[in-house]
Image: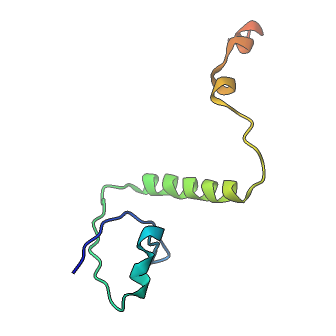
Amino acid sequence: MKAIEFEAPIENGIVHIPKEYQELQQSPKVKFIVIYNNNITKRDADTQAQLEEFRRLRAKSNNKVTATMDIVTNIDELIDDDLF
């Protein structure tokens, strides 16, 4: 018996196997041992679901990212305009 370890998302009861282990699909039978963190709160799960939805929508979008770290963190112009 061979053992491998990987983390994978579970969506609607389906475990998404990483590409490097796709040969598992050819096996007639495999044994899963699941280790999970049961300290995740509903808020954490909701936040994670929102992040996944954002990533999904962003992947489908053809919009370019227009904000950069420099633009976001550069407040000099705001200070010059007496906003701070």
Q: Is residue 22 above or below residue 66?
A: below
Judged from this view, the residue extending furthest toward the left is 1
Question: In the rendering, at what x and y percent does residue 24 appear?
Answer: 39, 80
Query: From where the camera sits, is residue 18 visible?
Result: no
Residue at 38 percent across and 55 percent down: it is: 41
Rendering quarter of residue 52: bottom right
Query: From where the camera sits, is residue 53 visible?
Result: yes
Residue at 36 percent across and 55 percent down: it is: 40
Question: In the rendering, at what x and y percent does residue 9 appear?
Answer: 45, 66
Residue at 37 percent across and 87 percent down: it is: 27
* Colouring: rainbow
Q: Is residue 22 above or below residue 54?
A: below
| Quadrant housing the N terminus | bottom left
Q: Nearer the viewer, residue 78 or 32?
A: 32
Left or right: 82 with respect to 4? Answer: right
Question: In the rendering, at what x and y percent does residue 75 appear?
Answer: 67, 16
Q: What is the number of callouts on the image?
A: 0
Question: In the rendering, at what x and y percent does residue 47 appear?
Answer: 51, 52
| Quadrant housing the C terminus | top right
